[in-house]
Image (cartoon, grey):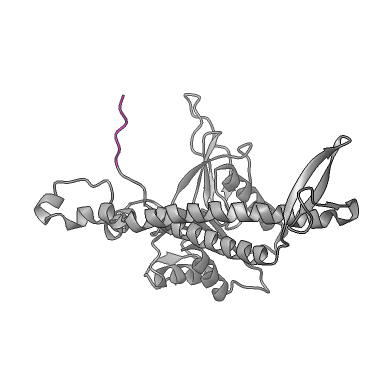
Amino acid sequence: MERVVENLSKDCLLPLLRERIAELSNVEAVLSKRLSRAPAGVLNVSPHRGGFQYFRVTAKTGRKGEYIPEEKMSFASTIAQRDYDAKMRAELQKLRGVLEKCVAKYDVSVAENLYALLHPARRSLVTPLVYPDEDFVARWSAVKYAGREFDADGPVLMTARGERVRSKSEIIIADALFRRGIPYRYEFPHELLHAGACDVDVARGVGEVRAGRRDAGGSRGVGECRGGLRVRGRKSVVVYPDFTCLNVRTRKEFVWEHFGMIDVPEYCQNMASKMEMYLMNGFCLGKNFVMTTETHDRPLNSMMVEKILEQLV
């Protein structure tokens, strides 16, 4: 059966091509500088008693060249490196030329703007393969979900966006995301594979998981839930990360967890268990997972939050 293509992923190739061109140019410059200091002459290599002998050939030495003894082998290496560098520089120049031609002709905006350029009467009839950023963000933000409930006697802490969160540190993170125009969902549920047996205690704010009891029909029900995790059977768990964010440039999501009591041994141990589960499910620090921490004496630093966002988006 033919697979139906519903949409195209965000085209992020052009920035990568430009980054590669800049990298090639930098390496070419380094090689050119090294070649300008390299010695002259040709390196000849001759078999000798199961090994090799090396000779440097110049206009003064004749065809055979001047023998390079063992104690001066670093000089032979310098000439060999020079020849390699010259060939590599030539190849890099070719590659850079190909990429520069590609960048000149590669217009990402054609595909991304085609839908927006349609007449409104036609746009309402079309399902695009590539949504404009504004439409994509609107659709992502419009997803309905049920987060965790708040304790009746818990503090009422509100973000600049007008939503309730559980801590002042979460206000710092939420407001930083909001200022930068980064769409996010607070405590959006994710179903993950469970790393181990069902009885995993994740204390105070990290989450607590307990195995669900079997009902009369013998199937395993949804387990007890507290603090952000809920067992679904023996193999999967529903987690509620603090923030699920959207990188608009790449159109990829990343999860942000804040661990606020890592100076408490039990909390820290359970945080490690949750991190293990995230890793098991393909989350990786610096790519699609962000983690911030604090202790009683070292609260979350808002400048650190800003630095993290500068590197991510």
Looking at the image, residue 228 sits to the left or right of residue 106; the answer is right
Q: Nearer the viewer, residue 79 or 186?
A: 79
* Magenta highlight on residue 243: no
In percent of width and height, residue 64 lies at 79, 48
| Residue lying at 44% horizontally and 71% vertically, measured from the top left | 175
The x, y position of residue 258, in whole percent, is 56, 62
Q: Quadrant of the N terminus?
A: top left
Residue drawn at x 49%, y 34% is 221
Towards the viewer: 24 or 68: 68
Dominant secondary structure, magenta: loop
User: Residue 126 or 197: which is nearer the viewer?
Assistant: 126
Q: Can the viewer see residue 237 in this picture? A: yes
Q: Nearer the viewer, residue 34 or 273?
A: 34
Magenta highlight on residue 3 = yes
The total number of labels drawn is: 0
**Residue 116 x, y percent position in the rendering:** 20, 57
Residue at point 27% right, 51% down? 111
Q: Which residues are magenta?
A: 1-6
Residue 74 position by quadrant: bottom right
Decide: is 245 above or below 297: above
**Where is 48 relative to 90, above or below?**
above
Residue 71 in the figure: left or right of residue 116: right
The x and y percentages for residue 128 are: 23, 47
Q: Is residue 12 visible?
A: no
Q: Is residue 278 left or right of residue 118?
A: right
